[in-house]
Image (cartoon, rainbow, N blue to C red):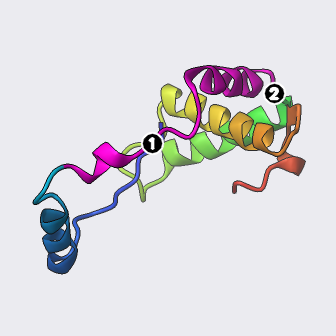
Amino acid sequence: MLRLHIGYPDMNDERQILRDRRSGDPLAAVESVMSQSDVVDLQAMVNEVRVDDALIDYLLEIVNLTRVSDQLELGISPRGTLALSAQQRLSHSSKGAITASPTTSNAW
């Protein structure tokens, strides 16, 4: 649940997008790289990562700063806070960690 602003492609890139679709959808040739059960297994691994209280406090500090900042129109919502926590669990899980803490987090 992260929001990115990517913008529009320039004219040359958009021209290529149109050319690529002259004879069909190039995405139709994309093949899966993992099965549905692989995805479920990965989700289970992420959910097993314990988030240390110190990391929770750290995330809440970041969230609060976005909510009181004069430079931002909107701060991070409660769902955004949950997404940050999930992102940290995913990041730590991909490294084989079972606990997510500020000292093992390099996402910031």
Badge 2 crowding class, 10 Å Cα cut-off, few under 14, some 14 to 19, many 20 or more, is: many
Query: Going 88% across and 38% down the picture, which residue do you hit?
Result: 97
Of residue 57 and residue 102, the one placed in the foreground of this image is 102
Please name the residue that numbered disc 1 is placed on.
31
Please name the residue that numbered disc 2 is placed on.
49
The amino acid type of the residue labelled 2 equals: Val
Query: Going 10% across and 60% down the picture, which residue do you hit?
Result: 22
Which span of residues is magenta-colored? Answer: 25-48
Secondary element at tag 1 = loop
Of residue 18 and residue 98, the one placed in the foreground of this image is 18
In terms of image quadrants, where is residue 35? top right
**Disc 2 or 1, which lies upstream in sequence?**
1
Task: Give the x, y percent position of residue 19.
Answer: 14, 67
Of residue 5 and residue 72, the one placed in the foreground of this image is 5
**Residue 73 lies in magenta, yes or no?**
no
Q: Vertically, is 1 above or below 20?
A: above
**Residue 32 lies in magenta, yes or no?**
yes
Frontmost of labels 2 and 1 is 1
**In the image, farthest residue toward the bottom:** 12
In terms of image quadrants, where is residue 15? bottom left
